[in-house]
Amino acid sequence: MSFMVIQDLKVHYPVRGGIFNQVVDYVYAVDGVSMEFESGKAYGLVGESGCGKSTTGKAIVGLEKITSGRVIYEGINVTNKRNNRKSTFNREVQMIFQDAHSSLNPRKRVRDIIAEPIHNFLKLSPKEEERKICELLEIVGMPEDVKYKYPHEFSGGQKQRLGIARAIATNPKLIIADEPVSALDISVQAQILNFMKDIQNEFGLSYLFISHDLGVVKHMCDYISIMYKGRFVETGTKFDIYNNPQHIYTKRLLSAIPQVTPIGRERRKRERIKVENDYREQYKNYFDEKERVLDLIPITSTHNVAALPKGVI
Ligand SMILES: Nc1ncnc2c1ncn2[C@@H]1O[C@H](COP(=O)(O)OP(=O)(O)OP(=O)(O)O)[C@@H](O)[C@H]1O
Ligand SMILES: [Mg+2]
């Protein structure tokens, strides 16, 4: 059973121009995406820069205005209620960002940064609140005495841990993580990813994990959506996407994953040449005349591909 359903989400930004600064066009940043979230599962959203991943995440939590579509949370249409700061939705759906630094108020001490969501959503006595803050710091592996420090006194990985402490303060069901590790060194990335997996298991969290890195998403996610120009080209389980990709764009993305061994690199090079040929030949099966991604069609109970039926079967 899914606890949250996103139906046909669209975010179109007006482009103004001309001498009267009128609306002359739209950027179709998100152009009709649907998703369902189950408890304890991690969903990956992958695609190249500018395809609409962050806009999708921000639109779901209400940081970006939705042009059309619906957000259904626990069976209730919350689309127009997500700015109610005390709502269950706002408590249970949290977001963390790539740049942990800018999402932590530089003028506040760690203690107050973490206390803010606790104040907003939980009714705790001062003593209980202090205990909760210490507990959260312990979960994210930070010593208690960091409470009185300011964000600039921490490394990138530590700041991301603080961002996570703040995000889990209100016992969320879903964390939307927008490129949470892409600003970090590789070794720190692995630590944070493993830590995110640990807390997922411990608290039964769900993730919407946004990344341009197919390796990271494979490591983290149960279900994956591949996004291109504001639409999903393919959605499925990790197995569907990595072992049985159908959309030409998905194949193209997968063929660009760097290989470590010389043999792997050679094989990848040949695959890439083939995929590029297929892409040119089969383009019309996967996009309409305006280069818009076609509607998704199911090919199994978990796997959907945006293509003409003859392009798939
Ligand atoms: N406020 C805005 N006004 C107009 N266009 C916008 C606005 N915000 C985003 N866009 C455009 O919407 C599209 C999607 O942007 P978005 O930030 O969601 O992409 P992304 O997939 O997160 O990219 P990246 O991987 O680089 O973070 C882009 O073409 C971007 O230029
Ligand atoms: Mg982004």
Image (cartoon, rainbow, N blue to C red):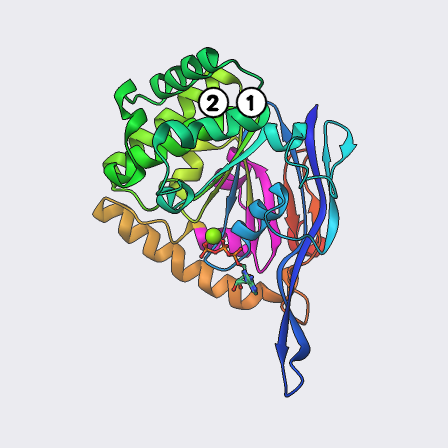
- Quadrant of the frame with the N terminus: top right
Question: In the image, which disc is placed on residue 200?
Answer: 2
Q: Is residue 99 left or right of residue 73?
A: left
SS for dot 2: helix
Which is nearer the eye, 214 or 299?
A: 214
* Distance from mark 2 CB to nearest ligand 2 atom below 8 Å: no
Q: Is residue 40 above or below residue 58?
A: above
The residue positioned farthest toward the front in the image shown: 126
- Amino acid tagged 1: Gly
> Residue at the spot x=66%, y=74% of the render?
25
Place of residue 287 in the rendered image (x, y in percent of width and height, measured from the top left): 64, 63
The range drawn in magenta is: 226-253
Q: From where the camera sits, is residue 115 visible?
A: yes
Question: In the image, which disc is placed on residue 40?
Answer: 1
Q: Is residue 136 above or below residue 72?
A: above
Which is nearer the eye, 108 or 136?
A: 108
Q: Is residue 109 left or right of residue 17?
A: left
Place of residue 45 in the rendered image (x, y in percent of width and height, measured from the top left): 52, 44
> Residue at the spot x=52%, y=29% of the render?
117
- Amino acid tagged 2: Gln
Contact between labelled residues 2 and 1, with CB atoms less than 8 Å apart:
yes
Which is nearer the eye, 170 or 284?
A: 170
> Residue at the spot x=71%, y=54% of the render?
295
> Residue at the spot x=26%, y=21% of the render?
145
Q: Is residue 143 above or below residue 81?
A: above
Q: How many marks?
A: 2
